[in-house]
Amino acid sequence: IKNWQNIRFGENLRIYVDEDGTTGQQYTTDVGIIDILAQDENDDFVVIELKRAESGYKVVGQVLNYMGWVQEKLAKDGQKVRGMVFVGRADKTLRTAIKPVADKILLKEYRVQMNLEDPQDN
């Protein structure tokens, strides 16, 4: 979240804020905790699940579960709900499981880049 502006999603996303002022970071639902709940430029919902290391097929069910909850509890007036899964590495089971829902859930492996800089005098 601290680096939200530095992430290149390929589109403009903003973190969801509900009517009570609760932000979409670690958004608590009665079916689990959504890592990040965002909205796109059309106000459609985007459920983002983050996995640090190699991940398998189970994350697909997890994201579909959250997407269903958002569709049922938050989406209004034809708002769409889609998912994004960011993993350190997608194993074969995840790459296979995502295929039938690839139109609804985007899968990406992430890479972290580090920039080294000289310290600044203040």
Image (tube, helix red, strand yellow):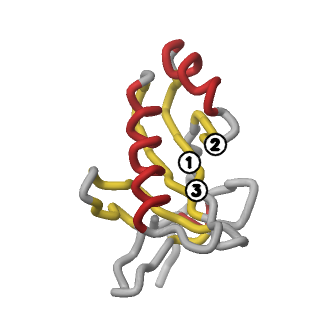
Image location of residue 12, percent across then percent down: 70, 67
111 vs 85, nearest the viewer: 85
Residue 79 sits in quarter: bottom right
- Gap between marks 1 and 2, in whole Å? 6 Å
Q: Are marks 1 and 2 in contact (CB under 8 Å)?
A: yes
Q: Amino acid at mark 3?
A: Val
11 is higher (above) or lower (below) than 61: below
Q: Are marks 3 and 1 in contact (CB under 8 Å)?
A: yes
Q: Counting other residues with Cα less than 10 Å from the Cα at mark 3, is it few (<14), some (14-19), or many (20 or more)?
A: many
- Name the residue that disc number 1 marks: 83
Q: Please name the residue shown 49% across and 79% down the image.
A: 121
**Mark 1 / mark 2, whichever is N-terminal:** 1
Image location of residue 81, percent across then percent down: 58, 56
Q: Secondary structure at mark 3?
A: strand
Image location of residue 32, percent across then percent down: 27, 51
Count of numbered circles in the view = 3
Q: Are marks 2 and 3 in contact (CB under 8 Å)?
A: no
Q: Amino acid at mark 1?
A: Gly
- Gap between marks 2 and 3, in whole Å? 8 Å
- Name the residue that disc number 3 marks: 81
35 is higher (above) or lower (below) than 73: above
Q: Please name the residue shown 49% across and 73% down the image.
A: 16
Image location of residue 40, percent across then percent down: 66, 67
107 vs 121, nearest the viewer: 107
104 vs 26, nearest the viewer: 104
- Name the residue that disc number 2 marks: 104
Q: Residue furthest top?
A: 92
Q: Secondary structure at mark 1?
A: strand
Q: Amino acid at mark 2?
A: Lys
Q: Secondary structure at mark 2?
A: loop
